[in-house]
Image: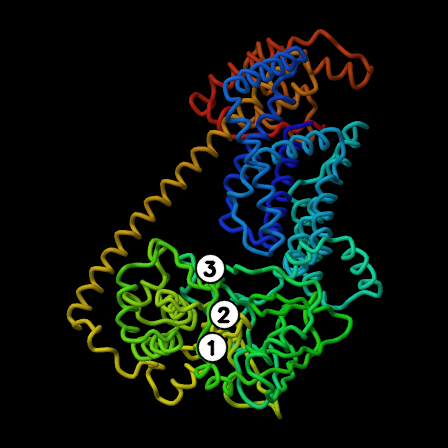
Amino acid sequence: MELKDIRWVAFMFYVNIIFFFKLLTNSYKIINFNYTYITILILITFILFYVYKEALVYKKHKAVAWILIIIASLIFIYFNKENIVMFNKSIIEDLDLLNKVISSGSDTNFNDYKRIITVVLPIICLVIFLLYYKGITHILLILTTFTMLFLWYLGYDTSVEESLFYYSLIVVINFSVSSNRINMKKMRVHNIRENIKSTSVITQTLFYGLLIAVLIKLYPVDIEGRYGNILKTKINSAITNENIEGSLNEKGYGLKVSGYNDSNLKLGGKIQLDNKEVFRVKTDQSYHLKGSVKSIYTGNSWVAQYEELQDIFKMRDTDSRYISYFGETKKSEMYIETTNIKTNTVFTPIYIMDINYSEGNKIYKNERADIYKSFNIIKEGYKLDFIDEYRMKPILINKGTDYAREDLYNYTQLPDSITERTKTLVEDIVKGTDNPLEKSKRIREYLESNYNYSLDVKDVPLDKDFVDYFLFEEKKGYCVYFATAATVMNRIAGVPSRYVEGFNMPKEKSYEDFYLVTNKDAHAWTEVLVDSKNMIWTIEDSSPTAREYESSLNENMPEVNINKSPDQDLMQDPNKDEIIKDANDEENDINTNLDYSHKYNYVFIKVIIVIFIYMFINLVTQNRRKNKILKGDYKYSYFYLERRLKTIGIKRESNETEKDYINKISNVKLRNTCLELIECLYKDYYGRYKSKEFKGKEFYFNLEKYLKEIQGISYYIYKYIIFFRVKTTS
């Protein structure tokens, strides 16, 4: 296999493997994925394969290489037995952990995959390179397609749909490269002279690849085929409940769907919201509609704790616990019709009693979080029966609270990042009361009175606790800031609480008898636990939605100051604020300069590595070419001669014979050697006689000596730095 073929194999494999990992990252929510590490693994494997197959020309050299590898491996194993056992044990533990985490639909981390990838990826690389070397060229296409189908039928259709454009483009490029390579090989076997420009092939491949990819992207993927449901039913019956839970959670709602940053990864920071309608609601008044619940605070993100889903949703348990707590009470009704949102989450008010949805769709319930999900993306409207949250407030206050030890532990969890000044502030706010609901009310009122709603915020430094940064430095933010602060402050005060994302409906109807809910109604708030036995919660919301904020600006209010006047005891002197601001700006400048310095160092190291790899491949290639010439391959020697003479301006014209071309060489010794080369070529081509008279060694060293005399120092640049291709067709 020629170097250009191996380069194409490596390039196509790299593109496919990066696409594969990107698909897995989106489907299994892998955070901090390290593509640089993957690239280094592939490069090392490619270099080893290339050296073994192409640089080690003789079988005895390959045998020696194998013996050395085996000896080195045995020595390494002997001196690292314990480490190897621990490494293998760690891989098994990683697999077990990943199985549990993926099944629950939670985020995974690249470090959980790193050991597995380190072992498996090089093996896959070597196998695929070998298959390509043997002529099995469509293996990458088959593997990529199988991965797409596998994830699609596991229920990760959102990730698959988002990848269709790139998949289509990769398929076309894969097929084109493989087909072109096969055709060129056939032409060379039959001594057919090809005059196809590589730029033309690349241009046409990219054009048709992009055209097909764009058309597929524009095609309405929501239209189901005739036998789609039958196939899905059969495949889903073979999938375990754990896989179903993973796919259901993957399609669930989070604020990132509406334009916010993903709270699983990062809280706060700059966002851009649109006013796209997501669904319409028909009911008597505005309510909070819950989409997701998270209860583990890390200091800069929220993670869901309870993700297990029941096989089939039964409302009787929900009915009984609400009736047990509130008594027989009037039910309210709501009808939700989705329009421009792709999720399987069934949005519900806090005290849901019953869900009426199409019989063909199963509803799954997260018991602890009170979250409901459909097996498929919701496209039809559904009806809800529920208890009005506003009418229940007085009852909750009168009944008081009742907490189980488990809930106190789960819903008052706090990380080590919580600062002492945050704890002190909460203690001052709730001082004088032991009533959990009164504490929660005071915290809400404090946030409303002392902090401004604003979308104009800075990114939160990674080394700072999010709540501390909001309370003492940023002092403004949107719903995520207020909800996170309220939840954490409640927990500091000993009040079990959790963080909720969903929508807060607009206050007025705007379409016939419907409320039009848009992405600007996407919202985050706090739920405070009231009764552990019946799992009764109440809503504490300390901020407006983006829509309400904009409405206040239209009414000539400079900001929604859920703060009318900041707490004077906690306000700083204005001049002091300016000094602190200047100091912070100076610190940010220093940090920025350090960041740039690190980036430049990182880029410099990567450039050095790339240059080293490039020069290594070039040297190996030069050695391989030299060996072919020294062994007397006069066909290859002639093409090598043409390519090298071009560097000193000697080119063969279309009307010249080979001998006319050779006579342009001024050096008599080299010219005579080259004429002997031409005689060998003529005997082969016209007489089918394989000459053994060609002196490859003499030819090679005479040519290189001649070029060195003419080119001087540029000789080394042309030979060892500028990578050139030896065209081996006539």
Q: Are marks 1 and 3 in contact (CB under 8 Å)?
A: no
**Residue at the top extreme?**
693
Distance of label 1 from label 3 (alpha carbons) = 18 Å
Distance of label 2 from label 3 (alpha carbons) = 12 Å
Q: Which residue is mark 3?
A: 296
Please tell me the numbered disc located at residue 539.
1
Amino acid type at circle 1 is: Ile
Q: Are marks 1 and 2 in contact (CB under 8 Å)?
A: yes
Return the residue nearer the eye: 438 or 526: 438
536 left or right of 201 in image: left
Element class at badge 1: strand
Residue 26 position (above or below residue 499):
above
Residue positioned 77% across, 74% down in the render: 359
Q: Earlier in the sequence, mark 1 or mark 2?
A: 2
Q: Which residue is mark 2?
A: 500
Return the residue nearer the eye: 151 or 176: 151
